[in-house]
Image: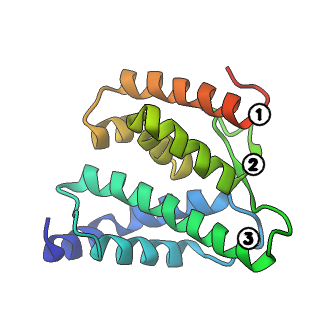
């Protein structure tokens, strides 16, 4: 996809991106300085500046999910460096299928754990990004990755168990 295709695709997907950004921001700390609209704008700038452009809408949403994660982690790193080590940036993130079991965790530790998981299974990382960070449905995630919904569910459960264990969180399996 070249830049004109990205310029065409973004307006078509803007409302959905705004919804996903709102979902991602809802899990951030209450005093977060980045707003959903700014996050969508940052995603666009990141995608527009990338040499690897999405080939279709599903790939665009998957790429946007990864960009949102990177932007939020970069923002957390900047905030942590401003504090000069005075506490980690905490976020609320639900790795459960229902929003009833949120976990408070350090976004940077979570990102590092996702990096370690990526060395084992990159698809599981993409599923976590799409399902739990920006809130795509099982079906939307399956479409974006070109896999079955059953594969998404299985890999999400495996990633969840691995992340809970890796991060020392309760309620892992």
Question: Where does the image place residue 117, in percent across and percent down from the top left?
Answer: 51, 36
Residue corresponding to mark 1? 169
Q: Nearer the viewer, mark 3 or mark 2?
A: 3
- The CA distance from mark 3 to mark 1 is 22 Å
Q: Is 155 placed above or below 139 here?
A: above
* SS of the residue under disc 3: helix
Give the residue at the far right of this rendering.
86
* Residue 13 left/right relative to 169: left
Residue corresponding to mark 2? 105
* SS of the residue under disc 2: strand
User: Which sits earlier in the primary sequence, circle 3 or circle 2?
Assistant: 3
- The residue lying at 77 percent from left, 33 percent from top is 169
Q: Are marks 1 and 2 in contact (CB under 8 Å)?
A: yes
- The residue lying at 51 percent from left, 52 percent from top is 134
Q: Is 145 placed above or below 64 here?
A: above
The disc placed on residue 80 is 3
């Amino acid at each position: 996809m070249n830049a004109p295709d990205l310029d065409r695709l973004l307006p078509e997907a803007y409302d959905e991106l705004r919804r996903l950004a709102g979902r991602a921001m809802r899990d951030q700390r209450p005093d977060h300085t980045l707003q959903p609209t700014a996050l969508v704008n940052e995603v666009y700038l990141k995608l527009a500046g990338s040499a690897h452009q999405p080939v279709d809408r599903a790939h665009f949403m998957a790429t946007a999910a990864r960009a949102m994660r990177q932007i939020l982690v970069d923002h957390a790193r900047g905030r942590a460096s401003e504090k000069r080590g005075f506490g980690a940036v905490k976020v609320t993130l639900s790795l459960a299928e229902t929003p009833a079991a949120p976990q408070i965790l350090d976004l940077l530790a979570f990102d590092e754990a996702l990096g370690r998981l990526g060395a084992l299974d990159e698809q599981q990382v993409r599923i976590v990004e799409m399902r739990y960070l920006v809130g795509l449905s099982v079906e939307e995630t399956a479409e974006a990755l070109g896999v079955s919904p059953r594969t998404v569910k299985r890999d999400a459960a495996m990633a969840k168990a691995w992340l809970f264990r890796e991060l020392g969180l309760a309620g892992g399996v």
